[in-house]
Image (cartoon, grey):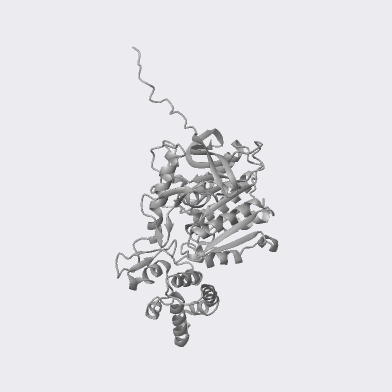
Amino acid sequence: MSDDKPDARAEKPEPVDDLVVTKHVLRSKRGELRYRARSGRIVLREEELKKDVFKGWKARAEMSVTAYELEPPDGDVTSRPITFVFNGGPGSSSIWLHMGLLGPRRVDLGDVTSPHPPPYRLVDNPETLLAVSDLVFIDPMSTGHTRAVEGGKAKTYHGFGKDVEQVTELIRLWCTREDRWMSPKYVIGESYGTVRAVAVAERLQQKHALMLNGIVLVSSVLDFGTQDFGMHRWDESCLNFLPTYTAIAHYHGKVRGRLTKLRQEAEAFSAGPYRTALAAGRRLPAKERTNVVRTLARLTGLSEEYVDRTNLRIEHWRFCTELLRDRGLTVGRIDGRFTGPAASLIAENMDADPSMDAMNGPFAAALHHYLRSELGNERDLPYEVYANAITKWSFEEFEGKPIFVADKLERVMRANPHLRVRIEYGYYDLATPYHAAEDMVAHLRVPDEAFDRIEHEYFETGHMPYLHEPSRKRELASIAAFVERS
């Protein structure tokens, strides 16, 4: 008797790449740009070995990407730069750099003092980096539309090492398939994306001998110990956060004077009397302690009584809660220019970051509309702005010590004497304070000439310089100039 039922043991079909192609025209600052956009997912595979026996090239993930390529006049892509972009988190999609800064279309959310209401606006970005470089925006595992293949475990990639492996493989695969090995190549990462950027650069170099021309670090944090309010290096974090406290307090009128002079005073105080006082601990004489309390209060806009109760050690989330308590407001951690109503006037910590409250809605609305209506990406799978599936990020490689990847930046700069690095800092950024990033650079173990290959730019904004319109235009012009120096 025949059995027409399908064999339950039959293998499931292999996943395949699924990219939607659309063509567009944009009037940019550099003239008319005709470009192709590709949005969707690319299948990533890994070699599978069991007892040293090759078992195949197995699909592991379907990676979400959006890519833009200018139509080259002569069809030669090797002379045109290509830039790979991602944000951080860990657990954030690439929505922020994509829709806020670099892509050909961007969200217009207004200004910190006059934000636009829903449903928000999507506008052309005539300053887009596409004018000088092709772009590939990458959503790491569980972010955007990226998922493990059916039957796979996403949490395998929810950690430093496997995340770096996967992003590295996507870049290698793209360069191979698109014949971009001979193109100038750049990586741009923001926040935790700066950790990913230098680790990916090192892995590309070490495993595949794929050398980059440049790395852009937006709001850099390569040494978590410089801003760790845990038990490792609390005092060092206090020193590095003070200048940012001063800048934010000045912005909100809690500290009077010229911002530049005040920041310089805060930096000098951190390097001198404040460092000495924290190192002294209980050995600090009462009179000197009183002077430190008085100076800290003046530079932070907090009361002397509050500074005294912190034992001279002001934690950043508590600073956001305390600074404008008398006005019933909290200030943003991501961007200290933003404020929001306090949930409780007696709470030790604010319940949410008002700067993220202001950004999430506009960016999410713009991205969802854009993918479906303009790029033809009609996937119903939720686009995860933040990876809700990630409940724990593994840093097993750094067990028992702060996360530190500055050594990887040192390695790629020593091995590649042509590699250039651009670092961007925001004065109102409490997620990656500028003084902590400066400290990391000051301790890099590279030849003197390597420091000439590092450029720095500062913005009177927070974590995302592009949330301030004049800063966004200046930032893009500077990144474009950086890329054009290939």
Q: Nearer the viewer, residue 247 or 34?
A: 34
Task: Say whether residue 438 is left or right of residue 307.
Answer: right
Q: Is residue 422 above or below residue 253?
A: above
Q: Who's the residue at 49% across and 39% down the image?
A: 39
The answer, for residue 20, to whether it is visible in the render is yes
Quadrant position of residue 32:
top right
Pinpoint residue 216: horizontal percent, then vertical percent: 58, 55
Could you tell me which quadrant the N terminus lies in? top left
* Residue 478, image x, y percentages: 59, 57
Instruction: Answer whether residue 391 is visible to the viewer in this image.
Output: no
Q: How far from the left and from the top, in percent, is residue 63?
A: 48, 41
Q: Nearer the viewer, residue 392 or 255?
A: 255
- Front-lying residue, 262 or 24: 24
Rendering coords of residue 369 (x, y %): 41, 43
**Total residue callouts:** 0
Which residue occupies 64% across, 41% down? 181
Seen in the picture, residue 441 relative to 253 is either above or below; the reply is above
Residue found at the far top of this picture: 1
Against 447, residue 265 (above or below) is below
Nearer to us in this view, 68 or 178: 68
Q: In the image, is residue 190 above or below residue 314?
A: above
